[in-house]
Amino acid sequence: GGKNVFIPSTIVLTAGAGRSLSIFNTTDQPHGFAIPGLGVEVVLQPGQEQTVELPTLEAHHLYAIGCHLHPPHRGATLMVVPGR
């Protein structure tokens, strides 16, 4: 039903500072958004949108994204590529 996945499943950002993600919970229950490798962990209420400020990102890194409230929910990946 599309309620246990992250869309998109891969997020690509360039290395550097000042990066952020806009997260939106489209479900009818609270859900978590976590990037453990970056120390990011937020809970979004139903219908809530939140901007997550990321720390400075280094190129050539992959970070797992998941729902810390519902571990079986399929996660996503944050890929950091070199800037131009």
Image (tube, grey):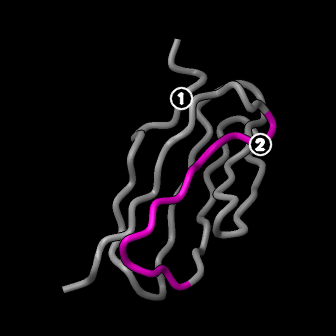
User: Which quarter of the image is occupied by the C terminus?
Assistant: bottom left
Residue 25, given in percent of the width and then of the height, sits at 62, 39
Q: Secondary structure at mark 2?
A: loop
Residue 82 left/right relative to 45:
left
Residue 73, given in percent of the width and then of the height, sits at 64, 27
Compared with residue 79, is residue 70 higher up or lower down, i.e. above or below? above
Which residue sits at x=47%, y=88%? 17
Which residue sits at x=48%, y=80%? 57
Q: Which residues are magenta?
A: 56-69
Write down the residue under mark 1.
5
**Was residue 66 drawn as part of the magenta stretch in this picture?**
yes
Residue 18 left/right relative to 53:
left
Residue 66, given in percent of the width and then of the height, sits at 64, 43
Residue 16, given in percent of the width and then of the height, sits at 41, 86
Residue 27 left/right relative to 11:
right
Which residue sits at x=76%, y=30%? 70
Which residue sits at x=65%, y=64%? 37
**Was residue 42 drawn as part of the magenta stretch in this picture?**
no
- Please identify the residue farthest to the left as the structure is shown: 84
Write down the residue under mark 2.
68
- Which sits earlier in the primary sequence, circle 1 or circle 2? 1
